[in-house]
Structure formats: structure tokens, C-alpha cells
Amino acid sequence: MTARPVPALELFDIHTHVGRLLHDRPGNEPSDLIATLDRHRIARAAVMAVEDPEELDFYVTTEEVLAACARHPDRLIPFCAVDPRRRYPERFDPRPIIAEYAARGCRGFGEVLAGVPIDHPGLQAIYSACGENHLPVLFHSDHLICSDEPGAPRLERMLRTYPDTTFIGHATRFWAEISADATADQFHITSSPIGRVAPGGATDRLLAEYPNLYGDVSGGSGHNALTRDPSFGVDFLCRHQDKLLFGSDALHPGQDLPIADLLRTCELDDAAREKIAHGNAERILGM
């Protein structure tokens, strides 16, 4: 992508973390996250709860996220989480829990990190409850978490089944399928596909066809999807300017956030840049 200087851009980060998540990295205290936001000139950020065991070493509960955000209410916005395997399957009802979290100020649900198919019955109960409470669902997808077949048929069924629920896709699988020739090995959490993007990928198609699907460009997977084929990346940002959300996936103190620099400097008109930088997030979060 050809770079150009951009003097100022308000950023709303749809995907950050607080707390200790990995045993071999320092925890991200709320003050550490604020320092990261300040360093990268990010105005506000949504903070994910982590209550699934698959990817990370430690939980950061919704209660911890609410407490952290209460310390910086002008900068941090809480998301809530519930593991879809909680209690006995026949007793699982997330509605009262999610309704309580929404009443206490949570503006979204995530990050979904459960090692189950994306159409798991427990997740479907969560999708329904989030639709009722107007909370967008930010899901991680890879070879294990929110799993699916190539072409994302299960995700597409969820988009059709829960049209009142806003879904925000993230991580290696979601972004590998920006290309029509994505293969199963590229869905692995460690994968970074290279080379030109083949038009017609499932992610590209679903973003165009379903008004309730959005894309979170955070992390290495989002950055890689937009830079592996620079001309395609700019076109993708332009075509889906109403459906993409800036995010960083900030996890630890001092983290570099190349996606912020990319969004500020890539060849994109100012209206599209503003939507992706903050406008779309503010709209779907009702802010």
C-alpha cells in the first residue's frame, strides 16, 4: 500500500485486553492499556472479557473488565463474556446473565474464544440473548475456536438465523478466508497466509451480503490480510468501509500496533478512513 501522512485521526479500538492472560508475558494493567492508547493516539477502546480456556492461560472475567473500565470511564468500554459450556447443557440459559451485564454498562459480548463449532447450541443461545440486548458479538475464529468448514457455511447459517444479532469476525480463520483459495492449514492460529488474494473469498462475500456481519482488523491476522496483497487490501477497505472496525488486540504493555499506522497512512479517502477508524464502532455500539 502506498503511504501518505495523515495529520490527525480519531481512533476507537474495538479490541483490547486487560489483566494477565499469558504465563510468559506481563499482565496488562488498566494503566498500561491507557499508556498504549495514548502512545498510539487512540481515543477510546472496548475491553474484552476472557472466560473460555482454549487459547489463553488465565481468565479475565467480566467482573474484572467492569472494574477496570470503571476506573477510566471516558476511555474504556466493557464487553462481557459467558462460556457456552457453563452449567449442564440442558440448563444453560445466558439471558439473565447477559441482561444483567448489559444493565451494568457492557456494550458488547466478547471475546468468544470457546473451542467449539461456531454454531454450537450454547453459542446460539448467546447469539439470541445478545440480539435481544443489542450487544454485538465479537468472535475469534481459527482451526479450533469457533470452528467451521471452508467457505464458512456454519457462520453463514448463524448470520441468517440471528439477523438481529451483530457479529464481528476476528482472527486467523476469518481473515484467511478473505481469499477464495484459502486452505484448512491456513486456519491454524499460527498461520499467516502470503501472496495474492484470490477474489471471492467467504469473508469478502459474507461482509457484502449480510448486514449483521462486521470485520475486526486487529492483530497480526487482520494486518496480514490487508497487506499480503496491497492493491487488494486498499480495494477491500474501500468496498467494505461501512463494515470494518479498527482494532489492535492490545495484550501487554509496550505493544507495537502496526495496524494503527496502516490505517493512518494507507491510500484511503478521508470519509472511509473515519468510518473504519471510529464511526462504524460508535454506530454499532450505540455511542
Image (cartoon, rainbow, N blue to C red):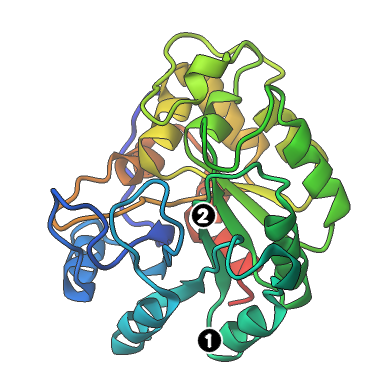
Q: Please state the horizontal and vertical placement of residue 263, each as a whole percent of the image.
A: 40, 42
Tag of residue 3? none
Q: Please state the horizontal and vertical placement of residue 23, each as a whole percent of the image.
A: 17, 52
Q: In terms of secondary structure, where does tag 2 sit?
A: helix
Q: Is residue 175 above or below residue 103?
A: above
In depth, the one of 197 and 94 nearer the eye is: 94
Kind of residue at badge 1: Gly
**Image position of 28 (left or right of 111):** left
Identify the residue under disc 1. 105
**Image position of 38 (left or right of 88):** left
Residue at 19% over, 50% down: 255
Tag of residue 274? 2
- Neighbour tally class for label 2: few under 14, some 14-19, many 20 plus, Cα within 10 Å: many
Quarter of the image where one finds residue 17: bottom left
User: Which badge, 2 or 1, comes first in the chain's sequence?
Assistant: 1
In depth, the one of 32 and 284 nearer the eye is: 32
Kind of residue at badge 2: Glu
In depth, the one of 253 and 54 nearer the eye is: 54
Q: Are marks 2 and 1 in contact (CB under 8 Å)?
A: no
Residue at 52% over, 35% down: 144
Q: Is residue 266 above or below residue 55?
A: above
Quarter of the image where one finds residue 46: bottom left
Q: Please state the horizontal and vertical placement of residue 149, each as a whole percent of the image.
A: 69, 26
Q: Is residue 146 above or below residue 137?
A: above
Judged by depth in the image, the label closer to the viewer, 2 or 1, is: 1
Residue at 47% over, 16% down: 229
- Neighbour tally class for label 1: few under 14, some 14-19, many 20 plus, Cα within 10 Å: some
Q: Quadrant of the C terminus?
A: bottom right
In depth, the one of 37 and 18 nearer the eye is: 18
Q: Please state the horizontal and vertical placement of residue 182, each as a whole percent of the image.
A: 59, 15
Residue at 44% over, 76% down: 62
